[in-house]
Image (cartoon, rainbow, N blue to C red):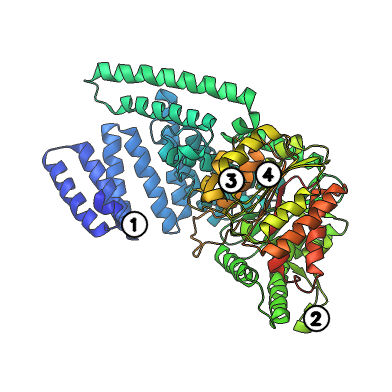
Amino acid sequence: NCWYLLSDFYKAAEHYRESLTISREIGDRWGEAISLNNFGNCYEALGDYREAIDRYEQSLAIFREIGDRRGEAASLNNLGNCYRALGDYQRAIEHYRECLQVVQEIAAEEGYFTGAPETLWRLYTGLGYSYQALGDLPQAAQAWKQAVEAIEWMRGRLARVEFKTGFMRGKYFVYRHLVPTLVELGEPGEAVLYAERAKARTLVDMMETAMAQGPEIVPAQLQTASQLLRQLEAAQMAEELPTSLSRERSGLQRAGQRAQAELEAFLSQLAQSNPLLYDTMSVDPERISSYMDSVTSSLSEGEVVLEYFVAGEETLLWLITEDGVQTAARIQVPRAELAEKVRTFREKLNEPPMPGEEATRALQARALGKGLYDLLVAPVEDYLQTASHLVIVPSDVLFYLPFGALFRCPGCETKRELWGGEYLIERYSISYAPSLASLYWPFRNRGDGVYHKALVVGNPTGDLEYAGEEAQGIASLFPRAELVVGDAGTKATVLELIGGGNYDVIHLATHGEFDRELPLASRVYFNQWEPLYAGEMLGLGLRGCELVVLSACQTGLPPEVEEELVVGDELQGLSQALLVAGTPSALLTLWNVADESTQRLMEEMYQELMGGVPKGEALRRAQLSLLRNTMYRHPYYWAPFVLYGVWR
């Protein structure tokens, strides 16, 4: 098994052959069947499917002879995989169906055995592939739906927190097959629901990963949950003890029952005291659907949602208005190609133009922005004729894309013609959301749009030249403002002010950093470079605070975008942490921004806000003020500002 896990299948096969010989010598039929099955796994991994089938059929016969139904199910599933790999899809389906029948018979007799959901999601996935290859898309979609149900059932019931870490990696491909198939079948509404289910898992995974790897960066409530989960984990070791240790098994089982009862009581209390945080600790498809309907019905005329879902060889785009899904587009671009386009575009925007190259850099940005506009927005632009605001729900690599810098220039073929187009931000105000359903609580938490009191923190690290001036200028715009500048901006001071301030706006002009490996460890820095983590922000109690601004954050596309790497989590981590904490709106930046231009933009935006202009439109006007200034017209200066949550 070790050689197999190290992918040295030849050495693994040698040892399985020895094991098979010994099992036959001593008359161990079960050991013989297991060795044959493992032997088949090696041949399958090496692509020798005929030899693998021979071993699996031998193991199947023995498992049936000795009455081992679980072994029978495993062999049937393996045979289905091999026939599918050989292109014999009908025989593959026959074996998958036989496997399913065996699993269901076992479940009817004794309940699902350990490993049954793992078998189910894999066989349903194989069934989906086989039906798809035969052109039976309805059956393929049904099989993949069943695979998703098994995956989500498993995900919700894994006892050990560390097992949950990265659990979905390696399984997102099921959603990536199901969602496009549903669109192709003319079911765009159902397709977007499954896309939302895939996205909804992200924050849950991030929270539980943080509880396992960095419990100190999450609020006390989640630390309590983490402790109870660990007690459950320890108690469930009883199942692994030999039956001879009956006293120890009994003691651990009682401890597990107590921990389970305490956890249920804690979650019940959390549901009452902090329903938003409770909601984000679990994923309920019915609740997601209900929240999506609520958000959709809350849209006003002219407000349009563009929701994306990056699948393997294509990207799906839904256009949603107050009347529901209006259309769905299938954008034929492989994920790797899309990632490269986004990366190239970002590289042209991340740095300011040098003196003398402003025009050249501006044209480069427009040309690349046009390519992305034509790819990602043009397919639905006929539906945008009366739109005034776009809500972008990104996916995967698109979290790194500043949509406002996409460039519309129909028919432009030459560089000269590019001067006649327009940026997306010139046509619409724009906001973002981690998912459509994630806007449910921000809509409920939004205030009256009147800003009386602000907490403004500027340059606590001491190295941002204009951040102090930015903070002073912003504070002067509010009737009441708490201004904290320079060394006074310690973490303890700021947290104390947040805890007792009832601020309408919290503005932090300081360094921020995203953490891709542990998204809830994304952070902003205070005096002495003391970090405030996104995980800590979950417990800040920001309900009543209309807007939180982090004006110096940065993130970037990973150097390599692996097939199963779900990127963008770090942006979701910081934005969702603030939304879960209770604020309806959070303004972040995608890259390091220039101090002087940021000061101008922020002061302009707040002046608009104080005049009663909605947040999304206020940000748009501030961005346009830079765009129309010859010094700051390059997207580097105005494009990185992204508003998450409520735009009104």
Residue identifier under label 4: 190
Tag 4 and tag 3, C-beta contact below 8 Å: no
Residue identifier under label 2: 417
Above or below, 221 relative to 462: above
Q: Which badge, 3 or 2, is on the more N-terminal residue?
A: 3
Q: What secondary structure is found at the residue carrying circle 4?
A: helix
Q: Which badge, 1 or 4, is on the more N-terminal residue?
A: 1
Q: Which mark is residue 462?
A: none
Q: Which badge, 1 or 3, is on the more N-terminal residue?
A: 1
* Residue at point 49%, 31% (across, down): 223
* Residue at point 16%, 42% (across, down): 23
Three-letter amino acid code at the position of disc 3? Ala
Residue identifier under label 3: 198
List x then y, in percent, for residue 108: 44, 25
Quadrant in which the C terminus is drawn:
top right
Q: What secondary structure is found at the residue carrying circle 2?
A: helix
Three-letter amino acid code at the position of disc 2? Glu
Q: Residue furthest front?
A: 487
- Label 3 and label 2: CA atoms lie apart by 41 Å
Mark 4 crowd level (few <14, some 14–19, many ≥20, 10 Å Cα): some
- Label 1 and label 4: CA atoms lie apart by 35 Å
Q: Which mark is residue 45?
A: 1
List x then y, in percent, for residue 466: 68, 60
Q: What secondary structure is found at the residue carrying circle 3?
A: helix
Three-letter amino acid code at the position of disc 4? Glu
Q: Nearer the viewer, mark 1 or mark 3?
A: 3
- Label 4 and label 2: CA atoms lie apart by 41 Å
Three-letter amino acid code at the position of disc 1? Ala
| Residue 275 seen from this side | yes
Tag 4 and tag 2, C-beta contact below 8 Å: no
Q: Which badge, 4 or 2, is on the more N-terminal residue?
A: 4
